[in-house]
Image: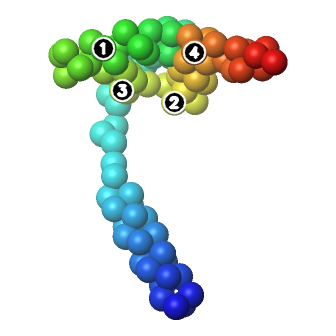
Amino acid sequence: MHLRKTSKQIILLSEILLLAACATQPMPNAGNLPGFLEGFWNGITIFFSLIGHLIEPTIRIYAFPNSGGWYDLGFFVGTATFSGGGVAAATAR
């Protein structure tokens, strides 16, 4: 019974990895890619961007193309800033 469950998990994992291997992104051809500050701003305004996206599907939460790691870091810091960064959970004793 344990071998059957393990086999199913391995097959499922293999299927997920196979599908993920097909995912690609087009190469950015823009000259002025969004960086840290734009990522930070998009992270702060994530809630409003989500509402806008529900109304108008062309509004995106996450900029593409972007500059990569610096944009991601700014987006993360902005989102953490908007959501309180866990400070509320740490002080609720």
The amino acid type of the residue labelled 1 equals Ile
Mark 2 sits on what residue?
A: 68
The residue depicted at 49 percent of the width and 25 percent of the height is 67
Q: Are marks 2 and 4 in contact (CB under 8 Å)?
A: no
Figure disc tally: 4
Location of residue 34 in the rendering, given as x and y in whole percent from the top left corner:
45, 16
What distance separates the C-alpha of mark 1 from that of mark 3?
Answer: 19 Å
Crowd band around label 4 with a 10 angstrom C-alpha radius: few (<14), some (14–19), many (20+) = some
* Callout in the foreground (2, 1): 1
* Callout in the foreground (2, 4): 4
SS for dot 3: loop
Mark 4 sits on what residue?
A: 83
Counting residues from the start of the chain, the first of labels 2 and 4 encountered is: 2
Mark 1 sits on what residue?
A: 51
- Residue at the extreme front: 93
The residue depicted at 27 percent of the width and 12 percent of the height is 52
The amino acid type of the residue labelled 2 equals Gly
Between 73 and 92, the one nearer to me in the picture: 92
Residue 7 appears in the picture as rendered: yes
Counting residues from the start of the chain, the first of labels 3 and 4 encountered is: 3
What distance separates the C-alpha of mark 2 from that of mark 4?
Answer: 22 Å
The amino acid type of the residue labelled 4 equals Ser
Q: Are marks 1 and 3 in contact (CB under 8 Å)?
A: no
* Callout in the foreground (3, 4): 4
What distance separates the C-alpha of mark 1 from that of mark 4?
Answer: 16 Å
Location of residue 59 by image quarter: top left
Mark 3 sits on what residue?
A: 64
SS for dot 1: helix
The residue depicted at 41 percent of the width and 72 percent of the height is 12
